[in-house]
Amino acid sequence: MYAIIATGGKQYKVSEGDVIRVEKIEAEKDAEITFDQVLAVGGDALKVGDDVKGASVKATVLEQGKADKVVVYRYKRKSGYHKKNGHRQLFTSVRIDKINA
């Protein structure tokens, strides 16, 4: 059984036991969180729309962290303009415990 959830402006296909990284969620380590925005549930048959209105996905927070640094370099030729920036995206690592369909 799998589910497609939406969080942080992205969609993720998850199954029970999966560990995924999502955009930062304000929650403590080992806290239980619930994803209520379930778009589809699959298994024997695919359910979408009104069929998954009450569906939810329960997960446990494993860690909060920062991803590797990404270098952003802007450059315009002939004008001498260049600018270098770095960015580290915050993330939350979660383990999917149960899909309630």
Image: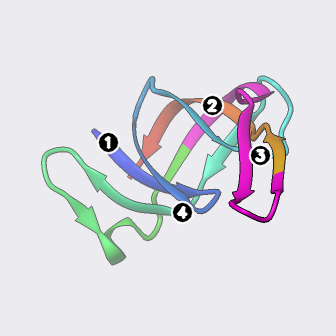
At 58% across and 59% down in the image, what residue appears?
Answer: 36
Q: Is the C-beta separation of discs 2 and 1 under 8 Å?
A: no
Picture colour scheme? rainbow
Provide the residue designation for mark 1.
Answer: 2
Provide the residue designation for mark 2.
Answer: 94
Q: Is residue 68 above or below residue 51?
A: above
- Specify whether 76 is left or right of 38: right
Q: Which residues are magenta?
A: 58-82
Q: Is the C-beta separation of discs 2 and 3 under 8 Å?
A: yes
Q: What distance separates the C-alpha of mark 4 from that of mark 2?
A: 16 Å
Q: Position of residue 64 (x, y in %)?
A: 79, 29
Q: What distance separates the C-alpha of mark 4 from that of mark 3?
A: 14 Å
Amino acid carrying label 1: it is: Tyr
- Specify whether 16 is left or right of 27: left
At 45% across and 23% down in the image, what residue appears?
Answer: 17
Q: What distance separates the C-alpha of mark 2 from that of mark 1?
A: 16 Å
Tell me the number on the disc at residue 25. 3
Q: Is the C-beta separation of discs 3 and 1 under 8 Å?
A: no
Provide the residue designation for mark 4.
Answer: 37
Amino acid carrying label 4: it is: Gln
User: In terms of sequence position, does the residue under pointer 4 or pointer 2 come before the other?
Assistant: 4
User: In terms of sequence position, does the residue under pointer 2 or pointer 1 come before the other?
Assistant: 1
At 77% across and 23% down in the image, what residue appears?
Answer: 30
Amino acid carrying label 3: it is: Ile
Quadrant for the N terminus in the image: top left
